[in-house]
Amino acid sequence: MKNIESGFTRLFAVGLLMTALVYTASQCAAQATPARALLALSKGDHVLAIIDPVSLKVIAAVPVGSDPHEVVASADGKTAYVTIYGGGSLHELNVIDLVGQKALPTIDTRPMMGPHGITFVDGKVWFTAEGTKTVGRYDPATGKFDWVMGTGQDRTHMIYVVPGGKRVYTTNVASGTVSILADTLIKPNQGPNGFGPPPHRDWMQTLIPVSKGSEGFDVSPDGKELWTAASDDGSIAVIDLGANKLSTTIDAKAIGANRLKFTPDGKRVLVSSLRTGDIFVFDAASHQLIKKLNTGKGAAGILMDDDGSRAFIGCTGDNYVAVIDLKTLTVSGHITIKGADGLAWAVRP
């Protein structure tokens, strides 16, 4: 009997040891999110991949909704927000704890439908809602939407917010326009006796006609120009943001254009083609094509290193993120992401 009891004791001790070893191994296998992390959305696996930008290894994958398109991180790099688009039919912003590598409660955007473009400015989440032709703003501090404005345009898609939150730019893909939304001081005309409504602030919209299919866009680092590329005819519209008018159109021949980004120094502009997989590199000053390089079957999201050394391209149909050396303008590597699309940096101080 004692032998049986001692045997059970040994088995119990071994079991405890194995459990401890498995737990320890799992803890060791889980890698912490680096202070500077590359975020990439997978449309195929429906996850947000957290990537070490040095080793280019995926260190964690957090589940998100059924049709993720764009992602942004909070200013402190601790939280990510993902738009769940559904072609304008869905209504979620997924929230991810990047430090804990886990999903947080989802934000329901209704009645704003089809969130797509997203950015984080002045402590708030700004996003387009394509299904309701609107731009909205969510305040994480209060857990409420505190501003919304309609564009009246079809497929209000991507977004850029000027620091300070007084000016918003968005592309309206199907309407072929760019909306400039500005917080404006209105000074009504006073009557003959000096009576009338007092000055007040209101949001005003200026519409700039561009080619249909204009989707991806960016603002030059000096804030003077907005460039947007059209998938339909492959042209690039250059808008003078001081005058709020189209200054020129470049016959870029970037058919299938999806995204457009300035390099951090403002000297070059990259345009991705979802139709051909090509990256078009333009000189920002001369508007001339410097080089066209292929990344695969289809190129979408573009993200730059802050020092201008690399560009990351979400190649949706190729199931990877292509890494481009911006000094040599060559593809230097790949990161396997099924249905790769939206990209963002998350940087903790």
Image (cartoon, rainbow, N blue to C red):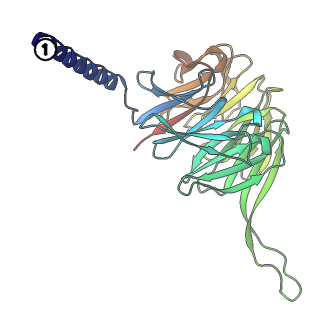
Mark 1 lies on residue:
6
> Which residue of the protein is positioned furthest toward the right in this rendering?
192
- Pick the quarter of the image with the N terminus: top left
Q: Is residue 148 above or below residue 92?
A: below
Label 1 crowd bin: few (<14), some (14–19), many (20+), radius 10 Å: few
Image coordinates for residue 175, horizontal then vertical, percent? 85, 39
What residue do we see at 67% from left, 16% from top?
A: 317
Closer to us: 73 or 248: 73
The answer to whether 302 is drawn above or below residue 248 in the figure is above
The residue sitting at the bottom extreme is 193
Residue 94 in which image quadrant: top right
* Quadrant location of the C terminus in the rendered image: top left
Query: How far across and down, in percent of the image, does residue 146 sit?
Result: 65, 58
User: Residue 18 vs residue 328: left or right?
Assistant: left
User: In the image, is residue 310 above or below residue 36?
Assistant: above
The residue furthest front is 1
The local secondary structure at tag 1 comes to helix
On the image, the x and y values in percent for residue 163 come to 59, 53
Task: Mark yes or no: residue 219 visible.
Answer: no
Left or right position of 174 against 147: right
Q: Residue at x 63, y 24 (%)?
A: 43
Q: Is residue 327 left or right of residue 11?
A: right
Q: Nearer the viewer, residue 284 or 272?
A: 272
Q: Position of residue 216 (x, y in %)?
A: 71, 34
Three-letter amino acid code at the position of disc 1: Ser
Q: Is residue 31 left or right of residue 328?
A: left
Question: How many numbered marks have been drawn onto this rendered protein structure?
Answer: 1
Q: Is residue 242 visible?
A: yes
Front residue of 216/23: it is: 23
Q: Residue at x 54, y 31 (%)?
A: 304
